[in-house]
Amino acid sequence: MATLPTLPKVIQLPTHKDGVQILEWKKVPNYVHYWFCERGFAYSTYGKGRFLKTGKDNDGYDHFRLYKDGKGYSFSTNQLTALVDFVHLTAEQRTVDHADGDKNNNHVSNLRPASCSEQVWHRKIMKNNKSGYRGVSWYKRNNKWVATIQYRYKQYHLGYFDDPKDASLVYEYWRTCLHTPEWMIN
């Protein structure tokens, strides 16, 4: 008489965290005890089971520490979202971008695939920007504002201007022309 195989233990994953409803969990590939949900929470079924605490990296993004074969590996919430296939990445769009620009809003509805150039496109103006406009800087030699844009790994000079706002208008025009995805053009 053959013996029946033992069934795996049924894992009961939580449906709420801090009053927030969790609708869907996905297993993290190649990490036996880890699950990730559409709200940006990670859960370990090792032992009694627990939600993983997030840490912050140098850029202020949430990350989790997952363990495999005794070694710890750090993953940003964005990386885990893509790894468990909540956000489908393509060969060209290999990173995950926050649609609203908030690093702490890791809900799947706020995350979208993006290429590195699209990440730059969505980046906020740097704190050390003197003009207050993207693509505009002061050119000391001519005592004028200069507009430049980078496209396909080359920098292009757009002109010198007395007013930074004029330089910004030219920059924004070329930025829209060069970086607008084809599906947005009529």
Image (cartoon, helix red, strand yellow):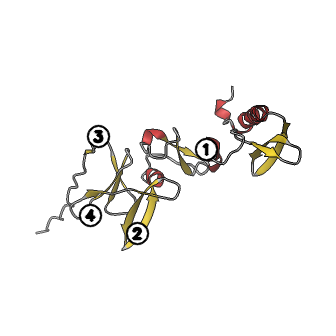
Nearer-N-terminus badge (1/3): 3
Compared with 21, 11 (above or below) is below
Give the spatial CA distance, label 2 vs label 4: 14 Å
Residue 21: assigned label: 3
Q: Residues within 10 Å of mark 3 (few under 14, many from 20)?
A: few
Residue that numbered label 2 is attached to: 72
Give the secondary structure at mark 2: strand
Task: Residue at the far top: name it.
Answer: 186
Q: Amino acid at mark 3?
A: Gln
Residue that numbered label 4 is attached to: 46
Viewer-nearest residue: 49 or 29? 49
Residue that numbered label 1 is attached to: 123
Q: Amino acid at mark 2?
A: Gly
Give the spatial CA distance, label 4 vs label 3: 22 Å
Give the secondary structure at mark 3: strand
Residue 89, percent across and down?
53, 48
Give the spatial CA distance, label 1 vs label 3: 31 Å
Q: Amino acid at mark 4?
A: Tyr
Give the secondary structure at mark 4: loop
Give the spatial CA distance, label 3 vs label 2: 29 Å
Residue 5, percent across and down?
18, 65
Image quadrant of residue 180? top right
Q: Disc 4 or disc 1, which is closer to the eye?
A: 1
Query: Is residue 65 shown left or right of residue 150?
Result: left
Give the spatial CA distance, label 2 vs label 1: 30 Å
Viewer-nearest residue: 54 or 75? 54
Q: Label 2 near label 3: C-beta < 8 Å? A: no
